[in-house]
Image: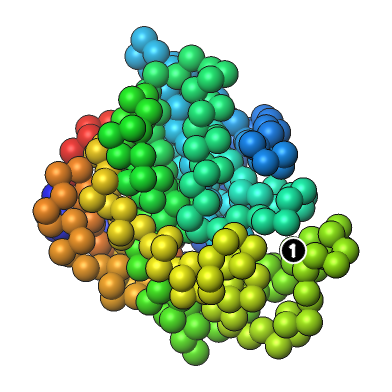
Amino acid sequence: MPYLPETDYRSPFYLFNGHLQTIIPSLVRRVKGVTYARERIATPDDDFLDLDWSFADEAVGPQPRLAVISHGLEGDSKRPYVTGMARMLNANGYDVLAWNYRSCSGEINRQRRFYHIGATDDMHTVVQHALRTRPYRYIVMLGFSAGGNMTLKYLGEQGRELAPEIKRAVVFSVPLDVVTSSVKISEPQNFIYERRFLRSLRKKIVLKAQRMPGQLDLAPLRRIRRLYEFDDHYTAPLHGFHDASDYYRRNSSKYFLSGITVPTLIVHAANDPFLSPECFDQTLVQNLPNVWLQVTQAGGHCGFVYESLQNAFWSENRALAFLSDGVA
């Protein structure tokens, strides 16, 4: 589908650049009204995933609806952008399954691998579990940042084999081109984000090494200053990729968009500090019948604050509108 025209969305005046629109919602927003019920499920390789469920205020329509939400890098189901979306969807008749990637639920996973931006095998395990254990016949998928990349990759990989219960998808702030976005995140103005990601990832590698003596070399950890270096030494080899470049290239969701068979909306902010120019390339979607790309002037990375940090965000209303209509 064609590139969508700009919306009338504007960020509040006090969040006057992309960095503020990214950081302030993450630090300040407190979402009330979402109560999770946690479920732990087994993976085929004898590991576990923790799923957090929240349920609709009341059913809408004859069949229960489910929204599967995937969080960003080093996030979890409790991040405000996830709980805010869950609250909006619960209020409009959707049950929500917000799943945590391996080692993102507060406990290190059992296997040597953990998670990565293209780990669609775990996403498939989650979807199949929901279909097998609950009577959902109408499922939508939502993802943020790395979770958006994983969602698009999953939809494209599944193609015409996608479970028929999955009807639509919306993703926000997606590094469609992971190769160039990895360069963007390491630019000097983004050091605060990269440093925060690395701090969290280092802790997980150390904990994993303590649980698996002799299986992980911690020596390179002291020298690592960039996400690329971390992925080159750890993420890529732990998940079967040759190096970081191979990992990024093979998991960039832009290469999977043509396989998507359900209506899917990608929303980016032009001032997103994480996304490279390649993530805004209109030609990625112009000949695709099921994928739309919309770019707002403001919003930052997974921000999209509307009038208040505590009320519904623009992104939550935009997602609901697309999921309800299925048209842009």
On screen, residue 170 versus residue 191, left or right, reads: left
Crowding near the residue tagged with mark 1, few <14, some 14–19, many ≥20 C-alpha atoms within 10 Å:
some
The percent position of residue 212, horizontal first and vertical second, equals 84, 59
Q: Which residue is mark 1?
A: 204
Q: Quarter of the image holding residue 225?
A: bottom right
Frontmost residue, 176 versus 17: 176
On screen, residue 258 versus residue 72, left or right, reads: left
Q: Image point 21% across, 68% down: which residue?
A: 281
Frontmost residue, 106 versus 247: 247
Does residue 199 appear anywhere in the picture? yes
The percent position of residue 166, horizontal first and vertical second, equals 36, 30
On screen, residue 88 versus residue 212, left or right, reads: left
Image height of 12 relative to 271, above or below: above
Q: How many dots with numbers?
A: 1
Image height of 245 relative to 67, above or below: below
Does residue 50 appear anywhere in the picture? no
The percent position of residue 202, horizontal first and vertical second, equals 72, 71
